[in-house]
Amino acid sequence: MKQRINAYEKGKGALQALYGLGIYLSKSPVEKPLLNLIYYRVSQINGCAYCLDMHSKDLRAAGETEQRLYVLDAWREAPFYTDRERAALAWAEAVTKITGGNVPDGVYEEAHAQFSDEELIDLTLAITTINSYNRINIAFGVKAGGYKVGQHEVRTDQVAEAQ
């Protein structure tokens, strides 16, 4: 697909809100490797090539195994995800694919058993944030392949400015 608009250049003001969410999430009690795994899974669901490229590189650089990345689409059948990861993945899928107007009670109960109220709110915010990035990248044809590890990392000076 041809890039339609460089939203990150032309929409800097509009995207500041999303950047602020990233700064907030960088301080979340939800562990960063789990957030990155969720970003990757949601990007799989949405088919966002740019985000898949980015998060796969960041995950591998942080020590994630190839096996877990390759099998993530079938996490329910795979034995190498923790109960906390499974709850987060189920929650991410349900929030991303909201059908019938709600997230099933069983998925909520499983997630709430693994995450505090604050963590579950942050996890939900992370899911909605990556869904927004996926949609922007897909809508405007952001090209995949050129991402460098850490390129979009939230820096400590950004966190300090946001406080």
Image: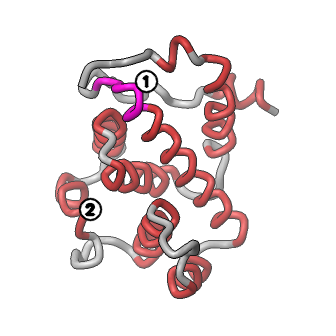
Mark 1: amino acid = Gln
Place residue 145 in its image quadrant: top left
Mark 2: amino acid = Leu
**Residue shown at the point (57%, 85%) measured from the top left:** 105
**Farthest-out residue, top:** 9
Q: Quadrant of the C terminus?
A: top right
Mark 1 lies on residue: 151
Number of callouts in the render?
Answer: 2
**Residue shown at the point (48%, 27%) measured from the top left:** 152
Q: Is residue 48 left or right of residue 100?
A: left
Q: Do tag 1 and tag 2 residues touch (Cβ < 8 Å)?
A: no
Mark 2 or mark 1, which is nearer the start of the sequence? 2
Q: Is residue 132 left or right of residue 44?
A: right
Q: Secondary structure at mark 2?
A: helix
Mark 2 lies on residue: 72
In the image, which residues are magenta? 137-143
Depth order, front residue of 26/20: 20
Q: Position of residue 52 (x, y in %)?
A: 31, 41
Foreground mark, 1 or 2, reads 2
**Residue shown at the point (49%, 37%) measured from the top left:** 133
Place residue 14 in its image quadrant: top right
- Residue 51, labelled with which disc? none
Q: Quadrant of the N terminus?
A: top left
Q: Secondary structure at mark 1?
A: loop
Disc 2: CA contacts within 10 A as few (<14), some (14-19) or many (>=20): many
